[in-house]
Amino acid sequence: MKNKILFVLCLLFGLMFINAGLNKFFNYMPVPQDMPEATMKMFIAMTSISWLMPLIGFIEVVGGVLIIFKRTRALGAIMILPIMVGIVLTHFTVAPEGLPMALILLAILVWVIVENREKYLPMVRA
């Protein structure tokens, strides 16, 4: 039962990141009009670096695809982890209204990492 729940959560998590990553390339989701000024300044600063958003979008798409499949889930989780930390910190500092959802997504990601911890051990062994 636990494996089925984890699969469904990873499927939804992966699809959400694939969608977010594709949006960075095709811009099909409109930017909210009521975005706070601090969030807008941060968004403008990030988009002024021409290579940053395509890189983040690429990592989100690849990580989202990898996290869906059990065999590649550990790699996908590690790829998405820095982006997820950035999302949580952004919502913690600039846009606190999205913090509950960001924390739920972080909890799912941590669960995936904990479930795959044996795959990470060779990286940290001396």
Image (cartoon, helix red, strand yellow):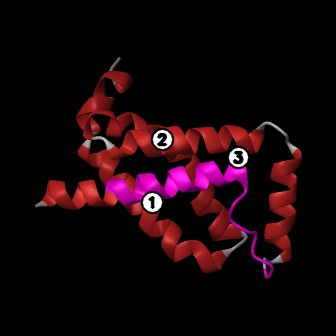
Q: Which amino acid type is shown beneath numbered disc 1?
A: Leu
Label 2 vs 1, first from the N-terminus: 2
Q: Which amino acid type is shown beneath numbered disc 2?
A: Gly
What secondary structure characterizes most of the magenta part? helix
79 left or right of 58? left
User: Residue 108: x, y in percent?
Assistant: 36, 59
Label 2 – label 1 distance at C-alpha: 14 Å
Residue under label 2: 63
- The residue stretch that appears in magenta: 10-34
Label 3 – label 1 distance at C-alpha: 24 Å
Residue under label 1: 106
**Number of residues whose C-alpha sits closer than 10 Å to that of mark 3, classed few (under 14), some (14–19) or many (20 or more):** few
Q: Quadrant of residue 1?
A: bottom left
Viewer-nearest of discs 3 and 1 = 3
Give SS at disc 3.
helix
**Quarter that holds the C terminus:** top left
User: Residue 61: x, y in percent?
Assistant: 54, 43
Does the magenta-highlighted stretch encompass residue 27? yes
Q: Is residue 87 above or below residue 83?
A: below
* Residue 44, numbered circle: none
**Number of residues whose C-alpha sits closer than 10 Å to that of mark 1, classed few (under 14), some (14–19) or many (20 or more):** some
What residue is rendered at 80% in x and 59% in y? 43
Q: Quadrant of residue 72?
A: top left
Residue under label 3: 25
